[in-house]
Amino acid sequence: MLTMTSGTMRSFGRLAFAALAGLGSSACRDSTGPDYQTGVQIHAGNNFTCALLKNGRVHCWGDNGAGQLGDGTNDDRNFPRMLAGDLKFRSIGIHGDGTHACGVTTAADAYCWGRNGDGQLGDGTTDNSTVPVKVLGDIKFQTVSAGSRFTCGVALSGAAYCWGRGAWGNLGNGATEQNTTPVAVSGNHMFLTVRAGSSSLACGVTTGGAAYCWGLNWRSEVGGETSEMCTVGPFFLSCASTPVRVPAPDGLRFESISPGSSYACGVLEDGRAVCWGRNESFRLGSETSEICVGGPGLSDAPCSRTPVEVSGGHRVTMIATSSSHACGISQSRQAICWGSNSQGQLGDGSPLRDPKLPVRVVGGLTFKGITSGRAHTCGVATDSVLYCWGTNFEGQLGNPSALIEEIPIRVAPAS
């Protein structure tokens, strides 16, 4: 297996990575090893990716400067590397541009690994960890979601908990303090899912199909009405420290929701995709005419204060958002993406172009799962093969074929 340490990657940069790609690209593209047929879930963060395989083991690859690959080192990996220890997981969650990851074991315990400067690992410390550490509190979880500097999860009871940085109210407990162990989200809602986003925003869908968001609201990304203001340093901005209900178009139920960076998207019960908040690079998947005032020291930006339908008439089964692009899976299992395409992360074969409308990912593949990282995208195909595309400077595509891939490539076999 070819690997590069973080120091090597940063010392030799583009030339070193290109040389490695030249040595191994052919074998990686064509490999059909058995590990390709084991993909269950895949999740992308800030320049790294993790996948859950059918045997319950987690493999990660890409940037590892904070230990977010969980393999006991800080070495960057261009190929999947198995998580340290013998834990078996039933779900994993990385839903923002952070540098930590989390998962729920088959025993319903939550574990996290990687950066922990804000207590986002939930182990009562602020020390980074290169191996999984158990989230404190004796809470049994259904799912967890690692966002940017904070984490949220849904307990078996349906109650939501968050931990880590809470400066903009993004822990949802009515406060703005940091917490290094889980705190209950206010409101006594019973959630099906909760996701922590790429900025200080979290959202969830209740068992009744109602969508709620909380946290930073400087681009109306909370999606509902709030008069609360939070102060962090020189900034005095709109926020919501407790869940605010997102108005559903036509009174429909939400099936799922995904917060990005200053925006969020959701899937309605009729399969329509809707987004709201900041609309730079057309990350809402539709043109909008509203302008959100940035506030002192912050620029104004196009936005939508309420959910707008993603253009193209697509009906989707899921959506995954990141800092500036989003992707979904249509009911016909095709992948569609919209927003920034600065490094080929939309997968339509044409980088450096931000389309105003969603585009189809090329290659004729069908998918059952998809995830959006900072500037890369990955998916689990319907045959369980793992694919990634977009930027590959840190090895986050799991295949050192090129620095940028504009179309899906197979993730190399796990080790």
Image (cartoon, rainbow, N blue to C red):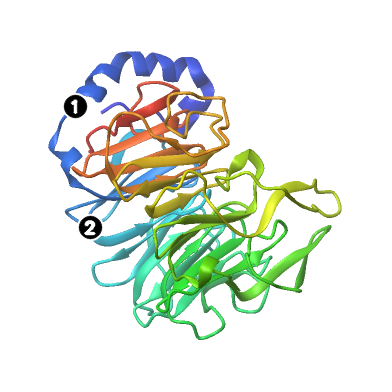
On screen, residue 15 above or below 186: above
Residue 300 x, y percent position in the rendering: 79, 47
Whether residue 129 is visible here, answered yes or no, is no
Mark 1 element type: loop
Percent coordinates x, y for residue 223 in the rendering: 62, 65
Q: Amino acid at mark 1?
A: Ser
User: What residue lies at 44% left-to-right and 51% top-to-bottom?
Assistant: 320
Answer yes or no: is residue 278 visible: yes
Q: Position of residue 413 (x, y in %)?
A: 22, 35
Label total for image: 2
Task: Choose top left, top right, bottom left or bottom right for residue 110.
Answer: bottom left
Q: What secondary structure is found at the residue carrying circle 2?
A: loop
**Farthest residue toward the left?**
34
Q: Which residue is mark 2?
A: 86
Q: Earlier in the sequence, mark 2 or mark 1?
A: 1
Quadrant into which the N terminus falls: top left
- Where is 110 relative to 309, above or below? below
| Residue located 66% across and 42% down the image | 280
- Looking at the picture, how far across and down is residue 122, in whole percent? 48, 68
- Tag shown at residue 31: 1
Query: Which numbered dot is residue 247?
Result: none
Q: Is residue 357 above or below residue 332?
A: above
Res 26 quadrant in image: top left
Of 4 and 196, the residue lying toward us: 196
Tell me: 213 left or right of 288.
Answer: left
**Alpha carbon of mark 2 to alpha carbon of mark 1: how far?**
27 Å
Left or right relative to 100: residue 323: right
Q: Quadrant of the C terminus?
A: top left
Compared with 321, 244 (above or below) is below
Q: Residues within 10 Å of mark 2 (few under 14, many from 20)?
A: few
Query: Which residue is found at the position 53% from the left and 48% from the top?
Result: 97
